[in-house]
């Protein structure tokens, strides 16, 4: 079935008491009719139930997991208490003391913090590379490399990595490949198609879509998931609460309609800013002028509405003043909800000689003419 239909019906063929929306299983534990059934279930911890304890599995979460796995084209998926919980757990399944990771240098800040500052405490090293060039990724690989971590399009500058070439390389060299695919959502990019082993999303963004839930998801194989359930999930207890899973299910019903609008509004406003006299450069994969446009059309089916631009003014005060003048754009972290947001940020990827100020904007579901007028008055007071 098509995505739109899948999101409404997949996994919901049986209606509990005829209820049109699935019930919320808020209970923490499950009881069994006999010791034998209890012991067998404890042994197997089956993904689809019977369930034992909400730390390792929950039917409300399972419904969401099945829908996301179906969208991503992976064997299975698991929800986490946030995108960072998903990313951290996914990485932890692939490293041990002495391991080495290769990571795209423009990855999300806390992902970098985990790899650069935290994991070295446990003897895990990471090399950050300008991963737009797949050769740079391959060159950074060492005999002890166990993981290649991608984020495409990446945070802040929305740079892409070649999923097909890197996925194939990972398979050949038996190195796990993992991607933070949050920006694209499962609608606009399916990395597993290219052999990427683990796909992570922060579901706090477009998947939830209403800025009222923090959640994350990992997609991959049954075999890997079963191992993670017995180890990282048991130990770190990063599972999503049932109510948050239920909210996520509700948000995901409208994902395709919302993404259609986000794409259209994001592209229109990015194109407007590209021609604006106060703007030096716009970083948005949806633009025809994006330097990796061929790759965008090759490996993605659409683009979302989080992007950044470099204003001509570069003093901290002037950049902050632009953002402060915005009326409809809230000043705040995160993105992917109904509302427009803007933040100033100073960034310096590996290939820039100096840090530059950019303004990152998320285009929400407001009227684009209103947003354009707002941006114009903020840029040219
Ligand atoms: C690209 C990206 N990945 C991961 C995360 C982390 O997700 P969460 O806030 O759900 O932990 C975020 C934002 O917060 C993000 O922007």
Image (spheres, rainbow, N blue to C red):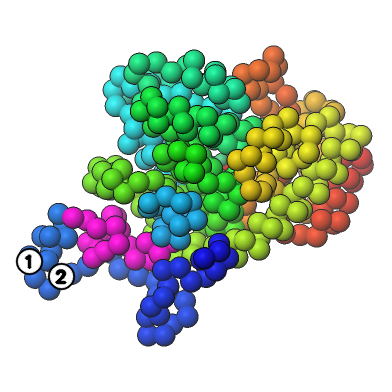
Name the dominant secondary structure of the magenta segment.
loop
Judged left or right of residue 286, residue 301 is: left
| Vertical comparison of 138 with 194: above or below | above
- In whole angstroms, how far apart are the C-alphas of marks 2 and 1? 7 Å
Q: Closest to the observer: 196 or 282?
A: 196
**Can the viewer see residue 138 in this picture?**
yes
Callouts 2 and 1 close, C-beta under 8 Å: yes
| Vertical comparison of 122 with 226: above or below | above
In the rendered image, residue 294, in percent from the top left (x then y), is placed at: 69, 35
Rendered residue at 62%/52% (across/down): 336
Q: How many marks?
A: 2
What residue span does the magenta drawing correspond to?
44-64
Residue that carries the numbered disc 1 in the rendered image: 35
Give yes or no for residue 50 being in the magenta stretch.
Answer: yes
**Can the viewer see residue 108 in this picture?**
no
Q: Residue 285 sits in which quadrant?
A: top right
Q: Which mark is residue 32?
A: 2
Rendered residue at 82%/53% (across/down): 371
In the rendered image, residue 98, in percent from the top left (x then y), is placed at: 30, 19
Judged left or right of residue 27, residue 363 is: right
Rendered residue at 37%/21% (across/down): 145
Rendered residue at 86%/56% (across/down): 369
Q: Secondary structure at mark 1?
A: helix
Quadrant placement of the C terminus = top right
The crowd level at tag 2 (other Cα within 10 Å; few <14, some 14-19, many 20+) is: few
Q: Closest to the observer: 277 or 101?
A: 101
């Amino acid at each position: 079935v098509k995505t739109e239909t899948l999101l409404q019906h997949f996994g919901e063929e049986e209606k509990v008491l005829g209820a049109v929306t699935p019930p919320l299983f808020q209970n923490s534990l499950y009881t069994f009719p006999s010791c034998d059934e209890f012991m067998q279930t404890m042994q197997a911890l089956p993904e689809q139930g019977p369930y034992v304890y909400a730390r390792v599995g929950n039917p409300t979460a399972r419904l969401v997991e099945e829908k996301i796995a179906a969208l991503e084209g992976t064997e299975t998926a698991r929800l986490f208490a946030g995108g960072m919980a998903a990313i951290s757990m996914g990485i932890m399944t692939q490293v041990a003391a002495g391991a080495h990771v290769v990571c795209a240098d423009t990855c999300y800040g806390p992902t970098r913090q985990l790899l650069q500052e935290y994991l070295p405490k446990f003897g895990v090293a990471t090399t950050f590379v300008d991963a737009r060039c797949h050769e740079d990724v391959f060159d950074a690989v060492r005999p002890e490399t166990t993981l290649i971590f991608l984020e495409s399009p990446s945070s802040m500058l929305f740079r892409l990595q070649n999923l097909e070439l890197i996925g194939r390389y990972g398979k050949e060299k038996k190195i796990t490949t993992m991607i933070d695919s949050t920006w694209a959502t499962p609608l606009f990019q399916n990395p597993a198609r290219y052999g990427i082993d683990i796909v992570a999303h922060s579901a706090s963004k477009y998947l939830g879509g209403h800025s009222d839930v923090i959640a994350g998801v990992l997609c991959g194989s049954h075999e890997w998931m079963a191992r993670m359930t017995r180890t990282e999930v048991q130990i770190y207890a990063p599972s999503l609460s049932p109510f948050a899973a239920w909210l996520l299910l509700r948000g995901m019903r409208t994902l395709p309609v919302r993404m259609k609008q986000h794409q259209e509004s994001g592209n229109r406003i990015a194109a407007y800013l590209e021609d604006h006299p106060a703007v030096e450069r716009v970083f948005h994969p949806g633009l025809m002028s994006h330097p990796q446009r061929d790759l965008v059309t090759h490996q993605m089916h659409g683009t979302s509405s989080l992007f950044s631009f470099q204003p001509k003014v570069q003093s901290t005060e002037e950049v902050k003043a632009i953002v402060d003048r915005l009326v409809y754009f809230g000043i705040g972290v995160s993105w992917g909800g109904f509302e427009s947001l803007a933040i100033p940020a100073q960034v310096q990827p590996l290939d820039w000689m100096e840090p530059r100020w950019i303004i990152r904007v998320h285009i929400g579901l407001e009227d684009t003419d209103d947003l354009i007028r707002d941006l114009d008055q903020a840029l040219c007071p």
